[in-house]
Image (cartoon, rainbow, N blue to C red):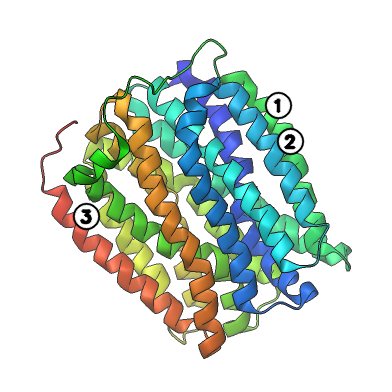
Amino acid sequence: MKPYIKQILSAFLILFSCLGFGRFAFGMILPNLQASLELSTTQVGFIGTANFIGYFIGILFVNSLYTKYPTYKLIFATMILQALFMVLMTVFSNYLLISFFYCLAGFLASISNISIMSYLSNEIPKDIRGKAIGIVVSASGVAIVISGQIVPYVESIVKIDAWETSWILFSCIMVVFAFVSQIGIKKDTSHHLSELKSKAFEYFFISSFWKVGILYMIFGLTYAVYVTYFVSAVISKYNFSTSISGDFWALVGFLSIFSGYIFGILADKTSAYKALILVFILQTISNFILTLDLNFIAVWISTITFGISVWSVPSLITLLTSIHFDVKKNAQVLALVTLLFALCQTIAPVGAGYLYDLNKSYDLVFLISSMLTFFAIILSIIFSRHIIKEH
């Protein structure tokens, strides 16, 4: 692990900013944004969906960009531009314009994310890859912890333009990390994908592709709902303040720091599919609890089970693609399964927001999520019994 510390640290900072602050901190600023702009839950859900639409579109272009430009230049440029578009979100009060710039931010985040994860898959040896990727994806958890404390603090001292202040702060941090992260990305290394013989559509006829893809799709649908609406849901059901909700959100982030690492080790010792069985059991519990009218202790249980498992899924999916497919195909397959994942996370926030506006409750939303994750448990059990063949 020691020879790869710089690469792992750089990847950590990239995910910390482009996904941790760029996407997952959105759930913390959402209540203030909704109140200050007087938006419906469907409208704020559309803003969240716009980010996922951008992420989805970015996946369509990442292969060609990753091939054409050196990794370090590509990631630096996308991080700087993402920070710019996040700042532009704060300039406007019209939710459609905010959605437009958040869509562009999502586009750039997907390129940074997939590029650095593909880079790691090529750089890190297989025997420690699960552990290394687990450390990297924990970056989002660290960002959630920090945002869960920063946003309530900013709201306590900035009475007007509170969400805008937090969002600009996150953007500035992203710019700093765009420079710092360059240290660990080799300037003389390029991972060309032009040698690929397979066309993208050919993977759709390979069962291994769909084993990974279906599980990632379910995760996309369910996690997007949780990270977008958890804070709003507990405020709505329990009348918690933003500060208390931020503490819950910070706990999710703190526990998720260890989720990728813990389940990465478990996957290295057993298998990625067996690790996913436990992951989806925990996520089923976390979602189902939010459908029940229990006391606040139940919220702690939900945050613990979700936090300890959530960021293990991207690392386990990355690990599975590197096991199922050789190094020449891995980046393309990872991009394709992430495309399916992004499609599902794109429709989830606006769909969930619409259900809330119909029922004035998040119970049905989280019930559907728990049913989906339960189905993922069954699939993971079935797939864990199959022999993995590299394509």
Helix, strand or loop at label 3? It is: helix
- Placement of 307 over or under 12, stated as above or below: below
| Amino acid bearing label 1 | Phe
- Quarter of the N terminus within the rendering: top left
Question: Is residue 306 among the parts visible in the rendering?
Answer: no
Of pointers 3 and 2, the one earlier in the residue sequence: 2
The answer to whether marks 2 and 1 mark residues whose Cβ atoms lie closer than 8 Å is yes
Location of mark 3 (residue): 380
Helix, strand or loop at label 2? It is: helix
Location of mark 2 (residue): 175
Question: Is residue 206 among the parts visible in the rendering?
Answer: yes
Q: Residue at x 24, y 61 (%)?
A: 377
Could you tell me residue 350's position as x and y percent?
A: 53, 71
Q: Residues within 10 Å of mark 2 (few under 14, many from 20)?
A: some
Could you tell me residue 95's position as x and y percent?
A: 72, 67
Q: Residues within 10 Å of mark 1 (few under 14, many from 20)?
A: few
Instruction: Return the residue nearer the eye: 104 or 157.
Output: 104
- Placement of 215 over or under 58, stated as above or below: below
Of pointers 3 and 1, the one earlier in the residue sequence: 1
Q: Residue at x 73, y 47 (%)?
A: 85
| Amino acid bearing label 2 | Val
Give the label on residue 142, or none: none
Q: Residue at x 63, y 64 (%)?
A: 47
Instruction: Return the residue nearer the eye: 295 or 374.
Output: 374
* 308 sits to left or right of 153: left
Location of mark 1 (residue): 179
